[in-house]
Amino acid sequence: MKLILFALLLFSSFRCAKTSVYVCDSPHAVRYHYKPNCQGLGNCQHRVVEISLDSAEKSNKTLCKWERR
């Protein structure tokens, strides 16, 4: 019984990985964001678009510093 409870606790602590992120649709954008209203997107002069995390990482974008907090 304790083993089952431990296993449930262990598996319930894992969160689903976020698979889509937001980026500024600018050729000079270098960061991706988990939230479309992130403070880091405030200076975006172009559209904010939703793309896959995989696509953002393949285009060498890194996580916004505001999102790391």
Image (cartoon, grey):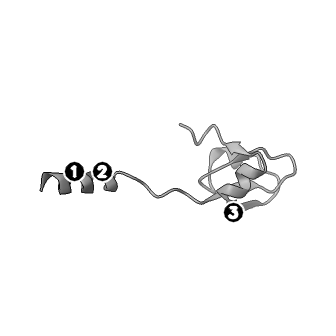
Q: How crowded is mark 3: few (under 14 residues within 10 Å), some or many (20 or more)?
A: some
Residue 14 position, x and y percent, is 39, 52
Q: What residue type is labelled 1?
A: Phe
Foreground residue, 8 or 26?
8
Left/right placement of residue 69 relative to residue 59 reads left
Q: What residue type is labelled 3?
A: Glu
Residue occupying image coordinates x 32% and y 56%: 12
Q: Which amino acid does label 2 sit on?
A: Leu
Q: Residues within 10 Å of mark 1 (few under 14, many from 20)?
A: few
Q: Mark 3 points at which residue?
A: 50
Asked if 28 appears above or below 35 in the picture, the reply is above
Q: Which mark is residue 6?
A: 1
Which of the two discs, 1 and 3, labels the residue nearer the N terminus? Answer: 1
Kindly state the secondary structure of the residue where label 3 is placed. Answer: strand
Q: Name the residue under label 2.
A: 10
Proximity of marks 1 and 3: CB atoms separated by less than 8 Å: no
Foreground residue, 25 or 12?
12
Q: Residues within 10 Å of mark 2 (few under 14, many from 20)?
A: few
* Residue at mark 2 to residue at mark 3: CA–CA distance: 31 Å
Kindly state the secondary structure of the residue where label 1 is placed. Answer: helix
Residue 36 position, x and y percent, is 63, 57
Foreground residue, 20 or 48?
20
Left/right placement of residue 2 relative to residue 8 reads left
* Residue at mark 1 to residue at mark 2: CA–CA distance: 6 Å
Which of the two discs, 2 and 3, labels the residue nearer the N terminus? Answer: 2
